[in-house]
Image (tube, rainbow, N blue to C red):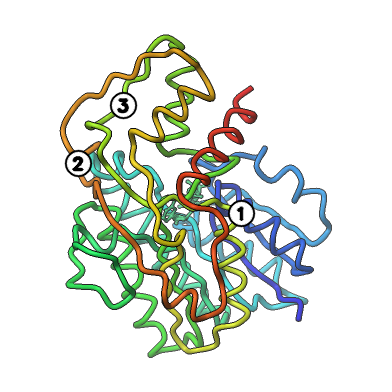
Protein backbone atom coordinates (compact mmCIF):
# COMPACT_ATOMS: atom_id res chain seq x y z
CA UNK A 1 0.00 0.00 0.00
CA UNK A 2 1.36 3.40 -0.95
CA UNK A 3 2.25 5.64 2.02
CA UNK A 4 2.90 9.32 2.58
CA UNK A 5 6.43 9.46 4.02
CA UNK A 6 8.47 12.27 5.55
CA UNK A 7 12.25 11.86 5.42
CA UNK A 8 14.43 14.07 7.59
CA UNK A 9 17.97 14.41 6.26
CA UNK A 10 16.63 13.59 2.77
CA UNK A 11 19.50 15.26 0.89
CA UNK A 12 22.16 13.41 2.88
CA UNK A 13 24.00 10.26 1.90
CA UNK A 14 21.60 7.58 3.21
CA UNK A 15 18.51 9.84 3.15
CA UNK A 16 18.82 10.45 -0.60
CA UNK A 17 19.16 6.71 -1.36
CA UNK A 18 16.14 6.03 0.87
CA UNK A 19 14.22 8.74 -0.98
CA UNK A 20 14.97 7.03 -4.31
CA UNK A 21 13.97 3.63 -2.90
CA UNK A 22 10.64 4.79 -1.43
CA UNK A 23 9.75 6.68 -4.64
CA UNK A 24 10.58 3.57 -6.70
CA UNK A 25 8.24 1.57 -4.46
CA UNK A 26 5.41 3.98 -5.31
CA UNK A 27 5.29 6.00 -2.08
CA UNK A 28 4.99 9.78 -1.81
CA UNK A 29 7.90 11.49 -0.11
CA UNK A 30 8.27 14.83 1.66
CA UNK A 31 11.93 15.57 2.28
CA UNK A 32 13.58 18.10 4.56
CA UNK A 33 17.25 18.89 5.10
CA UNK A 34 19.14 21.97 6.33
CA UNK A 35 22.00 21.25 3.88
CA UNK A 36 24.69 21.30 6.56
CA UNK A 37 25.98 18.08 4.97
CA UNK A 38 23.19 17.38 2.49
CA UNK A 39 23.69 18.16 -1.20
CA UNK A 40 21.14 19.09 -3.84
CA UNK A 41 23.08 16.90 -6.30
CA UNK A 42 22.08 13.85 -4.20
CA UNK A 43 18.39 14.42 -4.95
CA UNK A 44 18.59 15.48 -8.60
CA UNK A 45 16.83 12.33 -9.80
CA UNK A 46 14.23 12.39 -7.01
CA UNK A 47 13.33 16.01 -7.78
CA UNK A 48 12.12 14.88 -11.21
CA UNK A 49 9.34 12.86 -9.54
CA UNK A 50 5.94 14.46 -8.97
CA UNK A 51 5.73 12.31 -5.79
CA UNK A 52 8.66 14.15 -4.16
CA UNK A 53 8.51 17.52 -2.44
CA UNK A 54 11.69 18.89 -0.90
CA UNK A 55 12.20 21.82 1.44
CA UNK A 56 15.47 23.17 2.79
CA UNK A 57 14.84 23.81 6.49
CA UNK A 58 16.30 23.21 9.92
CA UNK A 59 14.25 20.78 12.00
CA UNK A 60 15.13 22.72 15.13
CA UNK A 61 13.39 25.76 13.61
CA UNK A 62 10.01 24.47 14.74
CA UNK A 63 8.11 27.35 13.13
CA UNK A 64 9.51 26.62 9.67
CA UNK A 65 9.10 22.84 10.11
CA UNK A 66 5.48 23.26 11.31
CA UNK A 67 4.61 25.61 8.42
CA UNK A 68 6.02 23.13 5.92
CA UNK A 69 3.95 20.28 7.38
CA UNK A 70 0.83 22.44 7.55
CA UNK A 71 1.18 23.40 3.90
CA UNK A 72 2.07 19.94 2.58
CA UNK A 73 -0.22 17.63 4.56
CA UNK A 74 -3.62 19.27 3.99
CA UNK A 75 -4.89 16.64 1.55
CA UNK A 76 -2.75 13.75 2.70
CA UNK A 77 -1.56 13.28 6.30
CA UNK A 78 1.91 11.83 6.86
CA UNK A 79 1.83 8.08 7.68
CA UNK A 80 5.44 7.63 8.73
CA UNK A 81 8.57 9.65 9.49
CA UNK A 82 11.92 8.20 8.47
CA UNK A 83 14.16 10.20 10.81
CA UNK A 84 17.71 10.35 9.47
CA UNK A 85 18.75 13.95 10.16
CA UNK A 86 21.68 14.00 12.59
CA UNK A 87 25.28 15.03 12.88
CA UNK A 88 27.23 12.36 11.04
CA UNK A 89 30.65 13.87 11.77
CA UNK A 90 31.54 12.06 15.01
CA UNK A 91 34.88 13.85 15.36
CA UNK A 92 33.21 17.27 15.12
CA UNK A 93 30.75 16.24 17.86
CA UNK A 94 33.68 15.15 20.04
CA UNK A 95 35.30 18.55 19.72
CA UNK A 96 32.04 20.44 20.36
CA UNK A 97 29.29 18.51 22.22
CA UNK A 98 26.69 21.16 21.27
CA UNK A 99 26.77 19.76 17.74
CA UNK A 100 25.41 16.37 18.80
CA UNK A 101 23.01 17.87 21.31
CA UNK A 102 21.47 20.03 18.58
CA UNK A 103 21.76 17.93 15.42
CA UNK A 104 21.53 14.39 16.84
CA UNK A 105 19.27 14.69 19.91
CA UNK A 106 17.17 17.85 19.50
CA UNK A 107 16.30 16.91 15.91
CA UNK A 108 14.75 13.71 17.30
CA UNK A 109 13.04 15.55 20.17
CA UNK A 110 11.58 18.20 17.85
CA UNK A 111 10.57 15.69 15.18
CA UNK A 112 8.60 13.76 17.83
CA UNK A 113 7.05 17.00 19.06
CA UNK A 114 5.63 17.75 15.60
CA UNK A 115 4.69 14.10 15.06
CA UNK A 116 2.45 14.36 18.13
CA UNK A 117 1.01 17.67 16.90
CA UNK A 118 0.31 16.28 13.41
CA UNK A 119 -0.80 12.86 14.74
CA UNK A 120 1.82 10.93 12.77
CA UNK A 121 1.71 7.34 14.13
CA UNK A 122 5.02 5.74 13.00
CA UNK A 123 8.74 6.55 13.15
CA UNK A 124 11.69 4.74 11.60
CA UNK A 125 14.92 5.82 13.27
CA UNK A 126 18.53 5.65 12.02
CA UNK A 127 20.46 4.54 15.10
CA UNK A 128 23.99 3.25 15.29
CA UNK A 129 26.45 0.70 16.66
CA UNK A 130 27.94 3.64 18.61
CA UNK A 131 25.21 3.25 21.27
CA UNK A 132 26.86 -0.04 22.40
CA UNK A 133 30.17 1.58 23.34
CA UNK A 134 33.11 -0.79 23.72
CA UNK A 135 31.38 -4.12 24.46
CA UNK A 136 33.26 -7.31 23.59
CA UNK A 137 31.91 -10.14 21.40
CA UNK A 138 29.24 -10.12 18.72
CA UNK A 139 26.69 -7.43 19.58
CA UNK A 140 23.05 -8.50 19.69
CA UNK A 141 20.08 -6.18 20.15
CA UNK A 142 20.08 -7.27 23.82
CA UNK A 143 23.77 -6.52 24.51
CA UNK A 144 24.54 -4.18 27.38
CA UNK A 145 25.15 -2.29 29.54
CA UNK A 146 24.93 0.52 26.98
CA UNK A 147 27.76 2.96 27.72
CA UNK A 148 28.56 4.92 24.54
CA UNK A 149 32.03 6.51 24.34
CA UNK A 150 31.18 9.34 21.90
CA UNK A 151 28.80 12.29 22.25
CA UNK A 152 27.25 11.09 19.00
CA UNK A 153 26.55 7.61 20.46
CA UNK A 154 25.22 9.18 23.67
CA UNK A 155 22.79 11.43 21.79
CA UNK A 156 21.65 8.51 19.58
CA UNK A 157 20.99 6.41 22.70
CA UNK A 158 19.06 9.34 24.21
CA UNK A 159 17.10 9.56 20.93
CA UNK A 160 16.20 5.86 21.17
CA UNK A 161 15.01 6.57 24.73
CA UNK A 162 12.81 9.50 23.80
CA UNK A 163 11.28 7.40 20.99
CA UNK A 164 10.41 4.48 23.30
CA UNK A 165 8.97 6.99 25.79
CA UNK A 166 6.81 8.46 23.00
CA UNK A 167 5.41 4.94 22.42
CA UNK A 168 3.87 5.23 25.89
CA UNK A 169 2.28 8.59 25.03
CA UNK A 170 1.11 8.94 21.43
CA UNK A 171 3.31 7.02 19.01
CA UNK A 172 1.84 3.78 17.61
CA UNK A 173 4.94 2.04 16.21
CA UNK A 174 8.71 2.52 16.02
CA UNK A 175 11.46 0.83 14.03
CA UNK A 176 14.96 1.43 15.44
CA UNK A 177 17.77 0.30 13.14
CA UNK A 178 21.33 0.23 14.45
CA UNK A 179 23.55 0.69 11.40
CA UNK A 180 27.27 -0.23 11.28
CA UNK A 181 29.50 1.86 8.97
CA UNK A 182 27.57 2.53 5.80
CA UNK A 183 29.35 3.24 2.50
CA UNK A 184 28.51 3.79 -1.17
CA UNK A 185 27.86 6.54 -3.70
CA UNK A 186 26.95 10.07 -2.55
CA UNK A 187 28.86 9.62 0.74
CA UNK A 188 29.20 12.89 2.63
CA UNK A 189 31.83 11.62 5.11
CA UNK A 190 33.67 8.49 6.29
CA UNK A 191 37.07 6.87 5.91
CA UNK A 192 36.82 6.03 2.19
CA UNK A 193 35.59 9.54 1.42
CA UNK A 194 38.48 11.04 3.46
CA UNK A 195 41.09 8.73 1.88
CA UNK A 196 39.98 9.64 -1.65
CA UNK A 197 39.99 13.36 -0.87
CA UNK A 198 43.47 13.13 0.65
CA UNK A 199 44.79 11.15 -2.34
CA UNK A 200 43.32 13.65 -4.76
CA UNK A 201 45.27 16.38 -2.98
CA UNK A 202 48.45 14.33 -2.66
CA UNK A 203 48.56 11.20 -4.87
CA UNK A 204 51.99 10.27 -3.47
CA UNK A 205 51.03 9.66 0.17
CA UNK A 206 47.98 8.69 2.23
CA UNK A 207 47.86 9.63 5.90
CA UNK A 208 45.72 7.18 7.92
CA UNK A 209 44.54 7.92 11.48
CA UNK A 210 45.50 5.14 13.93
CA UNK A 211 47.62 2.06 13.22
CA UNK A 212 45.30 0.42 10.68
CA UNK A 213 44.14 -2.31 13.08
CA UNK A 214 40.67 -0.81 13.68
CA UNK A 215 38.17 -3.40 12.43
CA UNK A 216 34.44 -2.90 11.82
CA UNK A 217 31.65 -4.15 9.55
CA UNK A 218 30.90 -2.05 6.44
CA UNK A 219 27.49 -2.23 4.78
CA UNK A 220 26.59 -0.96 1.31
CA UNK A 221 23.93 1.76 1.27
CA UNK A 222 21.92 -0.16 -1.36
CA UNK A 223 21.71 -3.18 0.96
CA UNK A 224 20.91 -0.92 3.90
CA UNK A 225 17.88 0.80 2.33
CA UNK A 226 16.68 -2.59 1.12
CA UNK A 227 16.81 -3.96 4.69
CA UNK A 228 15.22 -0.79 6.13
CA UNK A 229 12.19 -0.96 3.83
CA UNK A 230 11.92 -4.76 4.11
CA UNK A 231 11.77 -4.64 7.91
CA UNK A 232 9.32 -1.74 7.85
CA UNK A 233 6.96 -3.80 5.69
CA UNK A 234 7.41 -7.11 7.45
CA UNK A 235 7.94 -6.40 11.15
CA UNK A 236 4.82 -5.09 12.82
CA UNK A 237 5.56 -5.03 16.55
CA UNK A 238 5.02 -1.85 18.50
CA UNK A 239 8.82 -1.57 18.87
CA UNK A 240 11.09 -3.18 16.26
CA UNK A 241 14.83 -2.97 17.05
CA UNK A 242 17.35 -4.42 14.59
CA UNK A 243 21.11 -4.50 14.02
CA UNK A 244 21.68 -4.26 10.25
CA UNK A 245 25.07 -5.42 9.00
CA UNK A 246 26.96 -7.76 6.68
CA UNK A 247 27.08 -11.32 7.96
CA UNK A 248 30.06 -12.35 10.13
CA UNK A 249 32.49 -10.08 8.37
CA UNK A 250 34.39 -6.89 9.04
CA UNK A 251 37.15 -4.86 7.38
CA UNK A 252 40.30 -3.42 8.86
CA UNK A 253 41.32 0.16 8.21
CA UNK A 254 44.53 -1.27 6.75
CA UNK A 255 42.48 -3.20 4.15
CA UNK A 256 40.51 -0.05 3.33
CA UNK A 257 43.62 2.09 2.97
CA UNK A 258 45.41 -0.50 0.79
CA UNK A 259 42.34 -1.05 -1.39
CA UNK A 260 41.86 2.71 -1.83
CA UNK A 261 45.49 3.16 -2.84
CA UNK A 262 45.31 0.16 -5.22
CA UNK A 263 42.18 1.48 -6.94
CA UNK A 264 42.75 5.25 -6.78
CA UNK A 265 46.48 6.00 -6.62
CA UNK A 266 48.64 2.90 -7.20
CA UNK A 267 52.07 3.28 -5.64
CA UNK A 268 51.08 5.88 -3.03
CA UNK A 269 52.81 5.41 0.32
CA UNK A 270 50.55 4.79 3.34
CA UNK A 271 51.57 6.59 6.55
CA UNK A 272 49.80 5.52 9.77
CA UNK A 273 49.64 8.12 12.56
CA UNK A 274 49.74 5.31 15.17
CA UNK A 275 47.63 4.30 18.18
CA UNK A 276 44.71 1.86 18.22
CA UNK A 277 42.02 4.55 17.81
CA UNK A 278 41.38 6.83 14.86
CA UNK A 279 40.03 9.67 17.03
CA UNK A 280 38.50 10.39 20.46
CA UNK A 281 35.22 8.46 20.68
CA UNK A 282 36.17 5.97 17.95
CA UNK A 283 35.08 2.41 18.85
CA UNK A 284 38.05 0.76 17.18
CA UNK A 285 36.70 -2.79 16.93
CA UNK A 286 33.27 -4.34 17.02
CA UNK A 287 31.31 -7.24 15.59
CA UNK A 288 27.59 -7.50 14.99
CA UNK A 289 25.28 -10.46 15.39
CA UNK A 290 22.50 -10.31 12.78
CA UNK A 291 20.65 -13.47 13.81
CA UNK A 292 17.50 -11.43 14.52
CA UNK A 293 17.71 -9.78 11.09
CA UNK A 294 18.11 -13.13 9.35
CA UNK A 295 15.22 -14.62 11.33
CA UNK A 296 13.10 -11.73 10.07
CA UNK A 297 13.84 -12.92 6.51
CA UNK A 298 16.50 -10.46 5.27
CA UNK A 299 20.08 -11.42 4.38
CA UNK A 300 22.96 -9.26 3.09
CA UNK A 301 24.64 -10.33 -0.15
CA UNK A 302 28.04 -8.67 0.08
CA UNK A 303 30.82 -9.26 2.61
CA UNK A 304 32.33 -6.26 4.34
CA UNK A 305 35.48 -6.33 2.16
CA UNK A 306 33.43 -6.66 -1.06
CA UNK A 307 31.37 -3.70 0.13
CA UNK A 308 34.47 -1.59 0.74
CA UNK A 309 35.87 -2.28 -2.74
CA UNK A 310 32.54 -1.48 -4.41
CA UNK A 311 32.22 1.76 -2.44
CA UNK A 312 35.74 2.89 -3.34
CA UNK A 313 34.92 2.43 -7.05
CA UNK A 314 31.60 4.28 -6.67
CA UNK A 315 33.11 7.16 -4.70
CA UNK A 316 35.97 7.41 -7.16
CA UNK A 317 33.47 7.79 -10.00
CA UNK A 318 31.67 10.52 -7.99
CA UNK A 319 34.92 12.35 -7.34
CA UNK A 320 35.88 12.57 -11.01
N1 LIG B 1 26.76 6.62 7.39
C1 LIG B 1 26.95 5.81 8.41
O1 LIG B 1 27.90 5.07 8.44
C2 LIG B 1 25.95 5.78 9.55
C3 LIG B 1 26.13 4.84 10.56
C4 LIG B 1 25.23 4.79 11.60
C5 LIG B 1 24.16 5.65 11.63
N2 LIG B 1 24.01 6.58 10.65
C6 LIG B 1 22.88 7.51 10.74
O2 LIG B 1 22.17 7.52 9.52
C7 LIG B 1 21.64 8.83 9.30
C8 LIG B 1 22.07 9.34 7.95
O3 LIG B 1 23.49 9.45 7.96
P1 LIG B 1 24.33 9.80 6.67
O4 LIG B 1 25.53 8.96 6.69
O5 LIG B 1 23.46 9.80 5.48
O6 LIG B 1 24.81 11.27 7.03
P2 LIG B 1 24.55 12.65 6.28
O7 LIG B 1 25.24 13.69 7.07
O8 LIG B 1 24.88 12.52 4.84
O9 LIG B 1 22.96 12.82 6.44
C9 LIG B 1 22.36 13.51 7.51
C10 LIG B 1 21.60 14.68 6.93
O10 LIG B 1 20.91 15.37 7.98
C11 LIG B 1 20.97 16.75 7.68
N3 LIG B 1 20.75 17.50 8.94
C12 LIG B 1 21.57 17.54 10.02
N4 LIG B 1 21.03 18.34 10.97
C13 LIG B 1 19.83 18.78 10.48
C14 LIG B 1 18.81 19.65 10.98
N5 LIG B 1 18.93 20.23 12.18
N6 LIG B 1 17.73 19.89 10.21
C15 LIG B 1 17.61 19.32 8.98
N7 LIG B 1 18.55 18.51 8.45
C16 LIG B 1 19.65 18.23 9.19
C17 LIG B 1 22.35 16.97 7.07
O11 LIG B 1 22.43 18.13 6.27
C18 LIG B 1 22.51 15.70 6.25
O12 LIG B 1 22.09 15.88 4.91
C19 LIG B 1 22.13 9.70 10.47
O13 LIG B 1 21.13 9.73 11.45
C20 LIG B 1 23.33 8.94 10.96
O14 LIG B 1 23.59 9.21 12.31
C21 LIG B 1 24.89 6.67 9.61
Which label is found at residue 144?
Answer: none
Q: Residue 28, how many percent across, how many down?
A: 74, 67
- The answer to whether residue 163 is above or below residue 289 is below
Front in this rendered view, residue 309 or 120 = 309
Q: Secondary structure at mark 1?
A: helix
**Residue appearing at x 34%, y 37% in the figure:** 253
Looking at marks 2 and 1 on the same chain, the residue that comes earlier in the sequence is marked by 1
User: Residue beneath label 1, please?
Assistant: 222
Q: Residue 17, how many percent across, how many down?
A: 63, 52
Q: Are marks 2 and 1 in contact (CB under 8 Å)?
A: no
Quadrant in which the N terminus appears? bottom right
Q: Is residue 197 left or right of residue 32?
A: left
- Alpha carbon of mark 3 to alpha carbon of mark 1: how far? 27 Å
Q: Nearer the viewer, mark 2 or mark 1?
A: 1
Q: Is residue 254 left or right of residue 262?
A: left
User: Residue beneath label 2, please?
Assistant: 280
Amino acid sequence: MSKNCLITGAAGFIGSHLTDKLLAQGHSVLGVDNMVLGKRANITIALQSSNFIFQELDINDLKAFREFLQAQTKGQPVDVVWHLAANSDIQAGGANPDIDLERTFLTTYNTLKLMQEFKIPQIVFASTSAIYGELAGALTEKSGPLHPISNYGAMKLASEGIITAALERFLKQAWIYRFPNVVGSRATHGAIYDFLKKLKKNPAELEVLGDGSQEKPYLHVGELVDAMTFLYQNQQNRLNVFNISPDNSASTVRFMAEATVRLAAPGAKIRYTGGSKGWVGDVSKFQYSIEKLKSAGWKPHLTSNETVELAIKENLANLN
